[in-house]
Image: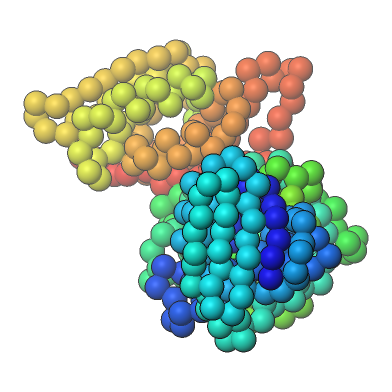
Amino acid sequence: MKFRVERESLADAVAWTAKSLPARPPVPVLAGVLLETDNDRLTVSGFDYEVSSQMGVDVQTDTPGRVLVSGRLLAEITRALPNHPVELDADEARAEIVCGTARFTLPTMPVEDYPTLPEMPTVAGAVDADEFASAVSQVVVAAGKDDTLPVLTGVRLEFEGDRLTMLATDRYRLAVRELTWRPGAPDVSQHALVPARTLSDTARAMSSGTEVTLALSQGTTGEGLIGFSGAGRRTTTRLLDGQFPPVRSLFPDTHAIQAKVPTATMIEVVKRVSLVAERNTPVRLAFTTGTLTVEAGGTEDARASESTDAVFDGEDIEIAFNPQFLLDGLNALGTEVAVLSCTTPLKPAVLTGEEADAESKPVNESAYRYLLMPVRVSQ
């Protein structure tokens, strides 16, 4: 196999594919990326039996063929190459890479031992790439990171007609985002539990395109696949097995207290005050008419407080949160004003967003909701 390609195109394709490769592959060939050329098109593929990644780039092909080389090493090499066209010449024993005056020789792996990538499932519909990436970034902040509870490490995607809903929770907070998409069938009604990390990486990488195509197998959760394609990339991942908890009932029907604070201001105040908060120490938010006071204390010698203006409706309240969980929700809002709604200091609070000029920029407050469990503090 022999081809010539632009360095940036090759580096981008290899980096995208190698990112999902396992750090400790069960068999050596799964540490490799597969390079295939045909009709002046190079396809770079990676697979670990759970996630498959594939990207195609235009090349000048002298000799078509297939070669399997170490993915992480090839990614490091292509990223470090000078800004010149790259020539790759490979046979069964080695692959030689030439770029300007730089030359690398890599051993190859047996292509015949490499597993066949799964086929894309049936296309279910498409969604705008930017909106999809934004929605995913808002939801994954609440996904669990404890692998002993695999169900909570996923994001549940619910497809109902032209409405796509994403949900994620780690038991301490819950994020829900709704958006419209373009289903292949108007009466579609499906759901999938997708690993949060894979979904996040995929949505971010495909945001450079105009739309993302979603493909979902007809199997039940845990037995099927979900596929995404866009921006010249394609990926599939196995769905997580297990029953996602019925979290919608956690959202309170009404609220007794509501406060509105400029999002950027609240983020800066919480960041500053939480500098003195020791590990697992909450920050306390005290709301009174027109004022929000944020306080934290680690030891007797380290305490902090800061006040800022707030639009407040309801009786005075003091409520405490894990500072990082609170910041995650504030950073995910993407609006000029943060709206915090509560019932009591010990019941879940809900963060939503609102534009500063709400009359000229109406916002669907239910589009993104971030529920946060308060922390009980001693008086």
Q: Position of residue 213 (x, y in %)?
A: 78, 57
| Quadrant in the rendering for residue 325 | top left
Report the coloring of the rendering.
rainbow
Establish if 77 lies above or below 331. Answer: below
- At horizontal 69% and vertical 65% (from top left) the residue drawn is 2
Q: Position of residue 330 (x, y in %)?
A: 49, 33
| Quadrant in the rendering for residue 196 | bottom right
| Residue 252 showing in the rendered view | no
Instruction: Please identify the residue farthest to the left as the structure is shown.
Output: 300
Establish if 301 lies above or below 111. Answer: above
Could you say which is closer to the camera, residue 46 or residue 283? Answer: 46
- At horizontal 56% and vertical 68% (from top left) the residue drawn is 95
Establish if 367 lies above or below 218. Answer: above
| Quadrant in the rendering for residue 291 | top left
Q: Position of residue 244 (x, y in %)?
A: 56, 68
Using residue 271 as the reference point, say whether residue 47 is left or right of it. Answer: right
- At horizontal 54% and vertical 42% (from top left) the residue drawn is 82
Quadrant location of the N terminus in the rendered image = bottom right
Establish if 40 lies above or below 25. Answer: above
